[in-house]
Amino acid sequence: MSHASEAGDPLIVGSKRFQSRLFIGTGKYASAEETRAALEASGAEVVTVALRRVNLADKSEGSLGRLLLSGRWTILPNTAGCYTAEEAVRTLRLARELGIGDIVKLEVIGDAKTLYPDNEQTLEAAKLLVKEGFTVLPYCIDDPIICRKLEDVGCAAVMPLAAPIGSGLGIRNPYNLRIILEQAKVPVIVDAGVGTASDAAIAMELGCHGVLLNTAVAGAKLPLLMAEAMREAISAGRKAFLAGRMPRRLYANASSPESGLIE
C-alpha cells in the first residue's frame, strides 16, 4: 500500500477521520441539483453550509436542506455573515439544536468589503465554543500568531486564507503558510482564495492538510468538470508533498550518468 493511498492517509480533525482532504461549499450554484452533482464530482466528504443563508429546516423535495441532510456528507455549519463573537456563537448553538453536529466552521468577519476576519472576535468566539464542546475550525488571516492562539485555546484545526474570499487569487503568501505549518500541531486547512486546480495543488504541496473552497467550483464555466479537477489536484498535491520534491538548482544536472559508460 502506498503512503498516499486513501486508506493509509486519512485527514484527522478532532475525533473525525476523512479520506478526502477537499472541503467544499454549497453556495452560488444554479440549483440544488447542480450542487448535488458538484459535491459528488468533488469526492468531498465534508460540505460547509452558511447557516444564515440556507434554510436547513426546509426538507421539501428538491430543496438544499433535503439534499444536505441526507446523511451522505458531514455537514460543517459556518457562521458566514456574522460580525461579532456573540452572533457567531448564537448561530452555532442553533445549529447544534438542529442536530447538525458539533464540528463547525467559525467565521467572524471584520470588514464587509474584503471579508477579512476579525482576529479578536474570532478568538473570543473560539474560546466559548471550545468550552461548550464544539469541534472548532476557525477561518483566520494567514498570520502565524493568531493561528497559534487559536490552537492554544483548543481549536481542532486552523483555516488561514490564501487570499480574500471569492477572489480566486490563489496562494498569495506561501511563506506565512510555511511558518504556520511549521509551528502547528493541528491540521492546517487553506480556506478562501483558491481559484483553480493548480492553486489547490500548491497548497497541498506546501504541506497543508486540506483545502476548503466554493467559488472556484461554483463560479467555473463548467462547475462539475472543475470539481473533478479539484479532486485530482488535492490528491496529486498531497502525493507530491509526501514524495518530497527534488532540490531546486540554478544549473542543469544531467539525468543520465556519464561515469561507467563504454567509450
Image: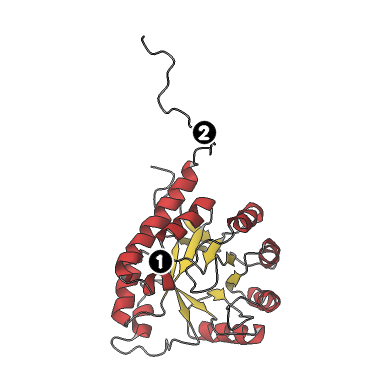
Q: Is residue 36 left or right of residue 4?
A: left
Pinpoint residue 107: horizontal percent, then vertical percent. 58, 77
Q: Nearer the viewer, residue 48 or 199?
A: 199
Residue, disc 1: 45
> In which quadrant of the rendered image does the N terminus lie?
top left
Q: Quadrant of residue 162?
A: bottom right
Disc on the earlier residue, 1 or 2: 1
Please report the residue visible at 53 percent of the width from the left and 52 percent of the height from the top: 206
In the orientation shown, which residue stands out farthest toward the top?
263
Position of residue 163 relative to residue 28, above or below, is: above
Position of residue 134 relative to residue 52, above or below, is: above
> In which quadrant of the rendered image does the C terminus lie?
top left
Residue 88, which numbered label? none
Q: Nearer the viewer, residue 69 or 4?
A: 4
Crowdedness near tag 1: few (<14), some (14–19) or many (≥20) residues, C-alpha within 10 Å: some
Pinpoint residue 171: horizontal percent, then vertical percent. 53, 61
Please report the residue visible at 48 percent of the width from the left and 74 percent of the height from the top: 166
Which residue type carries mark 1?
Answer: Glu
Residue, disc 2: 251
Q: Nearer the viewer, residue 7 or 186?
A: 186
Q: Are marks 1 and 2 in contact (CB under 8 Å)?
A: no
C-alpha distance separating marks 1 and 2: 43 Å
Please report the residue visible at 32 percent of the width from the left and 82 percent of the height from the top: 32
- Give SS at disc 1: loop
Pinpoint residue 179: horizontal percent, then vertical percent. 65, 54
Q: Is residue 101 left or right of residue 110?
A: left
